[in-house]
Image (cartoon, rainbow, N blue to C red):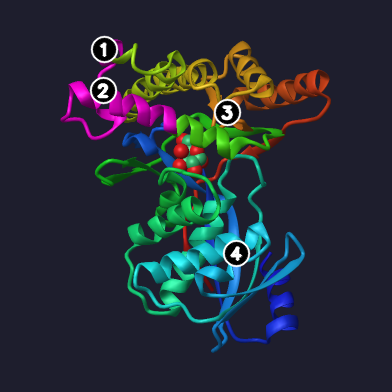
Amino acid sequence: MKEKIQKKFTELFGNEGVFYASAGRINLIGEHTDYNGGYVFPGAIDCGIMAKINPNGTDKVRVFSIDFDEYAEFGLEETDKPEQSWARYIFGVCRETIKRGGKVGGFDAVFAGDVPLGAGLSSSAALESTFAYALNLINNNGFDKMELALIGQSTEHNYCGVKCGIMDQFISIFGKKDSLVRLDCKTMEYKYFPIQLQDYKLVLLDSCVKHELASSAYNKRRESCERVRDAIKKNHPEIECLSDAKRIWLEEVRSSVTEEDIMRAEYVIGEVQRVLDVCDALGRGDMETVGEMMYQTHFGLSRLYEVSCDELDFLNKMARKLDVTGSRVMGGGFGGCTINLVKKDLYKQFVDTTVDEFEARFGHKPKVYDVIISDGARVVD
Ligand code: GLA
């Protein structure tokens, strides 16, 4: 990837410039909890986005995407929003940096990525984080890492139409090799947990399903949660977010929100607790409990939050059938991957059988990615 970028950069812009990179992510547990002020438990992975960037002394950004094989050029004013959707992520990062009082001058860039698109591994956060991190250094803005994650998140909100939480951009900036990070999305306190999987592996099975309307469906889930939070707040003004609510309080608001809203909230309240239970279980080396919580999350995401699909439910059922320790749909849902916690000696049989049976049922093979927990945003030598 580096060579390809280097070659194109030289061809278009010359030899100066520095390489930066950032990562995609997995999440062990804690899904759709971030925008509800709950916990998440992600880790950065060994695939991501890499860019070579050099300030060009103008007020224009000139950028080439290797994967889209496309060039874009734009200014740095709000009205300069580029046509290409991939370029809007970079434009958004520039604008959000400027809105926070940072400086951004024109620059030249070439970038490429190896995060599979639409697999729920957050290629967009990797792109935002690479540029947020690089522009902060290039322009000596001195933003801390949390501010850089927030720049990425506001880019999604204001330039890409997804009202996402903070998990993906956070981990893409803060990720550390061989550690998962538990983040409390209400206080923004976080703790690194070195991964000790003993005789187990984490493997992703990518259904290769990608839903067109995923971002509007995602935003709708968020709105449901906010309606329930606001209804509960009338009786319990002390709560700040849905994750502060007790399950029994849902009964008090049943008549003021829809049945669907209640289902969404029920899932979220359960999920916040499951993250804490998983962290405790990991501390005891109790992988069976970790896995069981993952299955419970899948059930909730499929039946209550309704962000799964036939292909993902099939992958989850196969895991159960083959005695895999834990399995669930990962990320926002509406397609993408399951994450599976599997004993090393069962790994081959699980992957081979599932790939075959999935293909027989759906007519295409799922992709298989072994999880390697790696560093987040960085300068590349
Ligand atoms: C997407 C969002 C995250 C988070 C997950 C679900 O990846 O970007 O903020 O809400 O979905 O956990």
Tag 2, which secondary structure? Answer: helix
Q: In terms of sequence position, does the residue under pointer 2 or pointer 4 come before the other?
A: 4
**Could you tell me how far apart the alpha carbons at marks 2 and 4 are, in whole angstroms?**
44 Å
Q: Label 2: which residue?
A: 232
Badge 4: residue crowd in 10 Å (few <14, some 14–19, many ≥20): many
Q: Of the residues shown, which amino acid type is indicated by label 1?
A: Glu
Mark 2–mark 1 CB contact (< 8 Å): yes
**Could you tell me how far apart the alpha carbons at marks 1 and 4 are, in whole angstroms?**
50 Å
Q: Label 4: which residue?
A: 50
**Could you tell me how far apart the alpha carbons at marks 2 and 1 are, in whole angstroms?**
8 Å
Badge 2: residue crowd in 10 Å (few <14, some 14–19, many ≥20): many
Residue 156: percent from left, percent from top: 50, 52
Residue 149 sits in quarter: bottom left
* Residue at the limit of the structure toward the bottom, as seen here: 57
* Magenta stretch contains residue 226: yes
Q: In terms of sequence position, does the residue under pointer 1 or pointer 4 come before the other?
A: 4
* Magenta stretch contains residue 16: no
**Could you tell me how far apart the alpha carbons at marks 1 and 3 are, in whole angstroms?**
47 Å
Look at the image and give the residue range highlighted in magenta.
Answer: 223-252
Left or right, 155 with respect to 12, comes to left
